[in-house]
Each structure stands twice: as C-alpha cells, then as structure tokens.
Image (cartoon, rainbow, N blue to C red):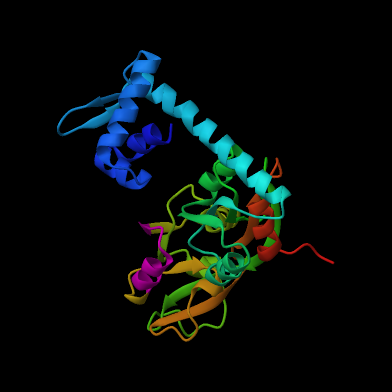
C-alpha cells in the first residue's frame, strides 16, 4: 500500500522507490504482484508518464486511510508505554504574532525527538477544514473579532487592533492617530478577497459605510511591507508583523479600526498523544 501511495504522490516509479528506500525493480515487482492479486490495473505507465487508473484512485483513497490507522495504532501503543511518536501536521498562517513557532518546535523536538513534524502554510479557512477532516492536528488561525471558528476546539491567544502602515514619506506619516475615513481615499495592499486575513479590514470599512480600494492582493507580509515602503499603497496589519524601527515605514494607530483574533486550534476528537504534547507547550492549561 505504501508503494502505491508513493507512486500516486510522486507520479514516478523512480521517485517513489527513492522515497520508500527500495530499488525501483523491487517496487515495480511488488506493484505488479498486487495488481495480479487484485485482478485490476492500478497504475497506467509508459516511458514518459505514470498515473493512477480509476481502480488505482479508489485503492489509494482507502490505502491512505489504512496507513493512517496503522500509524495511529503504533503511536497509541507507544504512548501507552510512555513514548510519544508519530507525525504531526501543523498549519501556520503568515501573520502569527503570539507564538514563536521555531522556538516552540525546538522545545517540542528536544522533548519528543521521535515525532516527525510537517509544517503547512496557508489560510485559516483551509486549516479549519483540514482539522475538521482529520488531516491536520494543530493550527494557528487569524480571524475577525466576533467570528470564532466552529466544529473544532480553539483557544484565544490574542485580540489585537490592526494599525495603519504607511511609507515614512507618506502625507499621513506625521499623524499620531488616524480614523478610517482618513484612509478612505488611499490605495491598499491586503490579503486576497474572502480570506480571514483580510476580513477584519473589510468588515471595519463596511461598518463605517466606507469604500476601500485594494489595488494589490498578496499572501506574503514581507511583500506587503515592501509595497508599502515603495509608496505604492498603505496597509492595515498587526503591529507585531512590522519590524521595530523598520526603515522606510511608519505604523499609526487607527481609531475604531479592524480587530483581529488569533486562535490556537485543534480537534477535540481523539487527538494524538503528540498533538496533546504540542498543545501543552504552545498553550499550557491555566493552573
């Protein structure tokens, strides 16, 4: 089963064999033997192309379930013997401000070296769906105030006001505080429309009855800051993602501006021992 899953994901017998630490001839032989046993062709192959057949796609879907169950059986057995092992999949949004991810994972790895960690970047909505589906263990989310995630377990890590970020030579850079209507005529850079990272700002402008022109949509906070530094746009961001004394930039508080809530999220349905251990490090229970 592992060989077929590897072929499905690598789309190459050579790369699948390397991933499984076997020679290619042995992997090919085992796949052909499995196909003879099942009486169906699982993999269509030519000298240039490898892909699953319809039967192969059906087989791989259930093979993944079986392999995940087998891995969970091993990790639970190890946990019963006082060991923590297995694989953890962790989702991290690009605007994490409350958790030092590298330092936290360093402490976790020192305590539980047998656990393999898979970091995934992306958006809060996809992480919520992945946790609910059981394909992700833990994630850090950023959502608008008043819109908590449902169907998963969460803990509020921080609630913060976004600040305006402008170039140091921008006409507004000398202001100590702004209102949303001071920014209404500006061009903005923000996260893509509909994403949780953008929603706090969109909702704040809607509530104030103001239109906002988002001229650039990007997912990288570094790129957002670079565009602002060039004087092309302004942004609304967590103050924690703007480096202290950042050259060419100025942050300004915004009265009645957007509010963002950062959550730590996980599934309460039978979490793996490694997930529980990570949660103890990221957000220890009070008391």
Which residue is at a point 40% across and 71% down the rendered structure image? 225
Q: Position of residue 156 (x, y in %)?
A: 70, 59
Position of residue 47 relative to residue 78, above or below, is: above
Quadrant of the rendering where the C terminus is positioned:
bottom right
Q: Position of residue 164 (x, y in %)?
A: 50, 72
- Left-right relation of 63 to 263: left
- Left-right relation of 19 to 252: left
Q: Position of residue 10 (x, y in %)?
A: 31, 41
Which residue is at a point 69% across and 54% down the rendered structure image? 276
Position of residue 131 relative to residue 51, above or below, is: below
Q: Residue furthest right?
A: 287
Location of residue 228 by image quarter? bottom left
Residue 44 inside the magenta-drawn segment: no
Determine if residue 272 is in view: no
Position of residue 240 relative to residue 217, above or below, is: below
Quadrant of the rendering where the N terminus is positioned:
top left
Q: Position of residue 146 (x, y in %)?
A: 68, 52
Residues in magenta, as a range: 215-228
């Amino acid at each position: 089963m592992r060989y077929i899953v590897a072929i499905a994901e690598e789309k190459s017998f050579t790369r699948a064999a390397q991933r499984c630490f076997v020679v290619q001839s042995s992997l090919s032989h085992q796949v052909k033997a499995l196909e003879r046993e099942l009486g169906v062709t699982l993999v269509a192959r030519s000298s240039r192309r490898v892909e699953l057949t319809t039967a192969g796609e059906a087989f791989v879907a259930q093979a993944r379930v079986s392999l995940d169950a087998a891995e969970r059986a091993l990790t639970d057995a190890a946990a019963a013997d006082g060991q923590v092992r297995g694989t953890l999949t962790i989702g991290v949004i690009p605007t994490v401000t409350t958790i030092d991810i590298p330092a936290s994972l360093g402490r976790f790895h020192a305590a539980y070296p047998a656990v393999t960690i898979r970091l995934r970047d992306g958006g809060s909505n996809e992480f919520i769906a992945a946790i609910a589906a059981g394909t992700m263990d833990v994630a850090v989310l950023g959502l608008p105030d008043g819109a908590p995630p449902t169907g998963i377990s969460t803990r509020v890590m921080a609630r913060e006001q976004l600040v305006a970020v402008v170039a140091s030579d921008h006409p507004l850079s000398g202001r100590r505080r702004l209102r949303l209507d001071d920014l209404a005529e500006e061009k903005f850079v923000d996260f893509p429309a509909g994403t949780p990272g953008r929603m706090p700002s969109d909702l704040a402008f809607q509530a104030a009855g103001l239109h906002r022109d988002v001229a650039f949509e990007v997912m990288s906070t570094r790129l957002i800051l670079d565009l602002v530094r060039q004087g092309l746009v302004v942004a609304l961001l967590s103050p924690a993602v703007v480096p202290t004394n950042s050259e060419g930039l100025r942050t300004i508080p915004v009265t009645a501006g957007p509010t963002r809530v950062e959550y730590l999220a996980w599934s309460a349905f039978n979490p793996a021992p490694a997930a529980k251990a990570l949660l103890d490090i990221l957000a220890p229970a009070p008391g």
